[in-house]
Image (cartoon, rainbow, N blue to C red):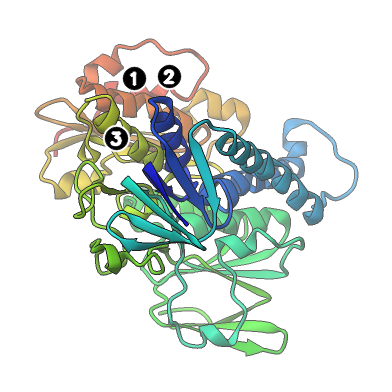
Amino acid sequence: MSRSFDAAIIGAGQAGPSLAGRLTAVGMTVALIERKLFGGTCVNTGCTPTKTLVASAYAAHLARCAHDYGVGITGPVTVDMKAVKARKERVLLQSRNGLEAWLKGMERCTVFEGHAHFLGPRELGVGEERITAERVFINVGGRALVPDMPGVGSVPVLTNSSLLELDIVPRHLVVVGGSYVGLEFAQIFRRFGAQVSVVEKGSRLIAREDEDVSSAVREILEGEGIAVRTDATCISFKPQGADIAVGVDCSSGAPEIVGSHVLLAVGRRPNTDDLGLDKAGIETDERGFIRVDDTLATNVPGVFAIGECNGKGAFTHTSYNDFEIVAANLLDHEPRRVSDRVTAYALYTDPPLGRAGLSESEARRKGHKIRVGMRPMTRVGRAVEKGETKGFMKIIVDAESEAILGASILGVGGDEAVHCVLDMIYAKAPYRTLQHAVHIHPTVSELIPTLLSELGPAS
């Protein structure tokens, strides 16, 4: 059976449903195709479930520290992982089911449940259906990368998706990968009561960040009893009874770590390998990400790639912005471009790391002469009052143009406070505009103008 539509959207992740809503609102007919779970990574295996676990882990941690606040708790703090998992499921199902119901009830939108593959440039097969559309939007997301490491096929390993299905606390969780996903899970399960070891191939954790940020995050995690092994240049796996031995070729420490569970958190790969892109002539890069221009158009006229599969951003907010860019150009006659986007993201350890714009090292590599403002969270009143004084705030300014280049806020509320800086970068306002702002006391954000009043010399 062949059916024609104005647009076809492959995938019901962050960008796809919102785009369907905009297109149908202007009278277009839309085919939306989802082969598995509505909501994509964010709702099912990313932001929504992991942040519910972060919240549960924080509750356990705060309960253990209750005496520091003058609060007495009788008996040891325990974690019921079955109840933790049930709470996580309730939260994500509310989002998933609500999204599915919205799409299936959307006028002029036809939902197909099945695997889509290209038959031609703007022709798709979904089971027995053949779908043609004037425009096709690929929104298929990505999944955890499982590289061919020595022995990886001989042991059971977990990814960010399968780890979410655990209803027990691992005796000893070995996290392979010292970046954002791995570190969040490391702290979560340590606070749930597991012994946790982090193994990182590089010389430091979250190597994208400045060295002072990496060092501070490591200190925070090690302070909670998480073992960190860096410079693990050759990582291997082998069964050891009911456990898993992880070989680590490090410059110091034991040659292997024996754990009950292993999480692989070493990167992502796009879900583009089974779409038949070659039949449509759609180009990808060497890692499988679909090549797009600044408006998210592929090399094939009428075909766009939005969300993680285009390699332009691996976040929910960048995926949603992809939708906004496409809708603005196609429907609103507003020229918006990916290159206008300012880098912004967070690491949801506790305390969180909020990042906006350039890091200090990135600014220097780009040739900026900069001024830097820094303040430890021990000198932030709101953090002292809450008893959460780990981390620091840092802001980077161009010494010549006085433009704000970026900020790293590692500390309580850092994931929210950093937006003060992000908005100023988008506004292209000189740093003195923010320096002269009057913020509410007591907050973390109120110290950002202070940081700008205490900038160091140009260097």
**Residue at position x 29%, y 67% from top?**
279
Residue marked by disc 2: 446
Where residue 345 sits, quadrant-wise, is top left
Q: Which of marks 3 and 1 is nearer the N terminus?
A: 3
- Identified by mark 1, the residue type is Pro
- In the image, 104: left or right of 139? right
| Residue wearing tag 1 | 449
10 Å neighbourhood of mark 2: few (<14), some, or many (≥20)?
Answer: many
Q: Identify the residue under disc 3.
A: 325
Amino acid under disc 2: Glu
As shown in the figure, which amino acid type bears the numbered disc 3? Answer: Ile
Q: What x and y, as percent, mark residue 439?
A: 42, 13
Q: In which quarter of the image is the C terminus?
A: top left
Residue 282 vs residue 123, the one in the foreground = 123
Give the Cα separation between the discs numbered 3 and 2: 33 Å
Determine whether label 2 and label 1 are within 8 Å by CB. yes
Q: Can residue 295 be seen in this view?
A: yes
